[in-house]
Amino acid sequence: MLDLQAQDSTLARLIHRKNSLPENTVIADLTSKAAEINNQRVEADTAVSDLTREQKKADGEVEQVRARRVRDEERMNSGQISNAKDLSNMQHEIVALNRRIATLEDEELEVMEALEEAQSKLTAVTAELAEINTALEEATAARDAKVRAIDEEARGVLAEREMIAQKVPDELTVLYDKIRKQSGGMGAAALRARRCEGCRLEINGADLRELVALPDDEVLRCPECSRILVRTLESGV
Ligand SMILES: [Zn+2]
């Protein structure tokens, strides 16, 4: 009975160890970090596409105004315009077009600078995300290896437990399992120096006399915690 309890306690310890592996915390932290960085990556990616579109638009606008200027200059240089007023108007228009081109080129430059910035941000965030994902993969692999080792050990303990359980009468196993579930994992405890090792309480004289009087094949129960009490050589009676 105590051997069975020892195996069950070992199993409980293994399950606890499996659930409290430090890698689990690391994995949870890295997972939320990865989600956060991925949001940043999506934002940067959107900024790059928006600015790329804006840059194309700015390019197109500059090209359009430049083409208009070329047309005007060609007409002026062709000598087709002889009227002085028309010529003067045309000159004014070219001056205005030059100003417009300068403004558009400034805007274009600003968009290009913003685009470069967005691209380097995207590159940095993508690299950071890759780093986190690598760390996450490593932590997951380390965790999985530990879980496999614990599961392996647990299988061994479980096999041993089966062998021990076979030697215990079914009725007693059922009782033991029931108490174990109710009593935080301990269904059987040794009676040592008049003390139940389950609840650690000393059993009073009257109860002890009653317990001792029971036949050897009778299952003893702790009067305090109801656990199965296992007689030992040092029971103290
Ligand atoms: Zn007890």
Image (cartoon, rainbow, N blue to C red):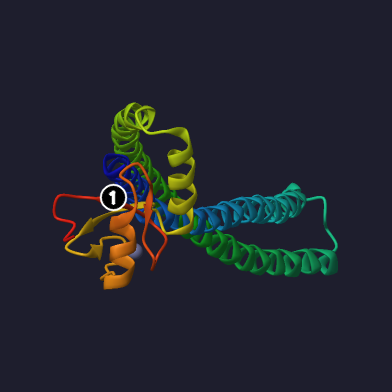
Residue found at x 24% / y 50%: 231
Q: Is residue 24 shown left or right of residue 51?
A: left
Q: Foreground: 114 or 166? A: 166
Q: Is residue 62 shown left or right of residue 158?
A: right
Residue found at x 29% / y 65%: 208
Work out whether 113 lies above or below 148: below
**How many neighbours does mark 1 have within 10 angstroms: few (below 14), some (14-19), or many (20 or more)?**
some
Q: Is residue 160 shown left or right of residue 40?
A: left
Where residue 161 appears, as percent x and y from the top left, is: 34, 33
**The quarter of the picture showing ligand 1:** bottom left
Name the secondary structure under disc 1: strand
Where residue 107 appears, as percent x and y from the top left, is: 60, 65
Work out whether 152 lies above or below 43: above
Q: Is residue 236 visible?
A: yes
Q: Farthest residue in the left direction?
A: 234
Where residue 106 appears, as percent x and y from the top left, is: 56, 66
For mark 1, what is the residue? 230
Residue found at x 34% / y 52%: 214
Quarter occupied by residue 198: bottom left
Residue found at x 43% / y 59%: 183
Is the N terminus in the top left, top right, bottom left or bottom right quadrant?
top left
Is the C terminus in the top left, top right, bottom left or bottom right quadrant?
bottom left
Work out whether 162 lies above or below 124: above
